[in-house]
Image: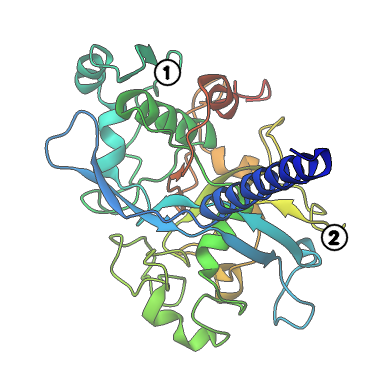
Amino acid sequence: MNRNLLFTIILLYVSQTILYAQKKAEKNKSAKDNTVLEPYRELVPGTKDIFLEMIPIPAGEFFMGSPENEPNRKEDEGKPQKVKVDAFWMGKVEITWNQYEPFMSKDMREEALNKDKLVNGKTLVDAVSYPSPPYVDMSFGMGKDGYPAINMTQYAALMYCKWLTMKTGHFYRLPTEAEWEYACRAGSTTAYHFGNDPKQLDEYAWYYENSSGGYKKVGQKKPNAWGLYDMHGNVCEWTLDQYVPDAYQTPKERKASDYIPVTTLYPIAVKGGSWDDDPDQLRSAARRGSQPSWKQRDPQIPKSKWWFTDASFCGFRVVRPAIQPSKEEIEKYFRTPPDDL
C-alpha cells in the first residue's frame, strides 16, 4: 500500500477518534449541566408518618443581589454578581416541629443510633451531637403541629442535617446564601419572586402586617414558581454563610455552592424575613445576620450552643445536592461550633 495513502488513512482515523471523544465529552458536560431531578418524599427517621418533601431546583445562572434602583435595597446587597448554580433539591417547606422533634427525642434518638444508614458498608458521617433539652417550650405557645421549628442555633440546624444524613444515607445540609436566593427567585429578577408590588405579599407570605404576632403553619400561602412555600416570611432561615456586610462589593463570577465559612458565632446569615418583619426585609435579595440579643434571656452559663431564647422568628429548611460528595467532603460542612458561644 502506498505510504502516503496509509498515512492519510491513519490520520483520518485519529482525527475521527478525537472528534468522537470531544463530542462525547460535550454531551456528558451538557447532561451534567442540565441534570433533571424529580421531587421526592423521604420518611423522617424515628417516625412512621412524617416525611420530608424535596423539590428539584434546576441548574442555571442568576444575578445575586439587588440592582441600585430596587426600592428599599440595602448597601449590603452590593452589586449583582453572576452566579452559576448546579441542580439540587430544597425542602418544599421550612422544617417543622414534627420533623425536628425526633432529633430532640432521647428514645427515638437511641433507637435510631442502632440503625445508622450504611453506604458501601460505611456510615456517611461520624458521630452526631444531640441537643440539650430546652429549658422552656421553644414554640412559646404559638403551636407545634405543622408549624416551623424555631429558636435553634445554626449549629443545631447543622447537627439536624448531619443526623438526617447519617440516618438516610442522603447528604442533607443548609443552603448557601446564593443557593437560597436562587431558589427563592425561581427565575425572577424582581424584588419578590412574584413581582415588585409588596401589596401582593398577602398572597404569598406571613409578615408583620398579617401574622397577628406569630408564625403560622407551613405551606398555607401560594408557592413560588418552583413549588417552594414560605420563601418570603413566616420564619427567616439559616444559611451556611458567615454574614459579611461587604461580601458582594467586588463583582465576580462564583458558584452557588461557594460560601463564607463560619468562624465566629455572630453574625451568621439568615434569609427570607419573618412574621415579625416589614415587607422590605422579605425581598429575595435582603440580607440579615444573627445577633447576640437572640440569647438575651438564656439562663445557662455558658449560654446554650443549641437554643436561642429570643429568636422565635428564625428556623431553617434543608437542601440536598444532586451529586453526593465523599464522606470527607461532607464532614467539612458539619463544623465544630465557634469558641465564642
The correct choice, above or below, for 82 with respect to 315 in the image is below
- Given residues 70 and 82, the one toward you in this image is 82
The relative height of residue 74 versus residue 298 in the rendered view (above or below) is below
Residue 43, picture quadrant: top left
For the view shown, which residue lies furthest in the left direction? 48
Position in image of residue 146 (x %, y %):
23, 53
Label placed on residue 251: 2
Q: Nearer the viewer, mark 2 or mark 1?
A: 2
Q: Residue 297 versus residue 130: which sits nearer the camera?
A: 130
Q: Mark 2 and 1 residues: CB-CB less than 8 Å, in contact?
A: no
User: Would you name the residue on which mark 1 appears?
Assistant: 128
**Earlier sequence position, callout 2 versus callout 1:** 1
- Which numbered marker is on residue 228? none
Quadrant where the image shows the C terminus: top right
Residue at 64%, 40% in the rendered image: 292
How far across and down, in percent of the image, does residue 305 sit? 52, 26
Q: Residue at x 27, y 34 (%)?
A: 101
Q: Residues within 10 Å of mark 1 (few under 14, many from 20)?
A: some
The kind of residue tagged 2 is Pro
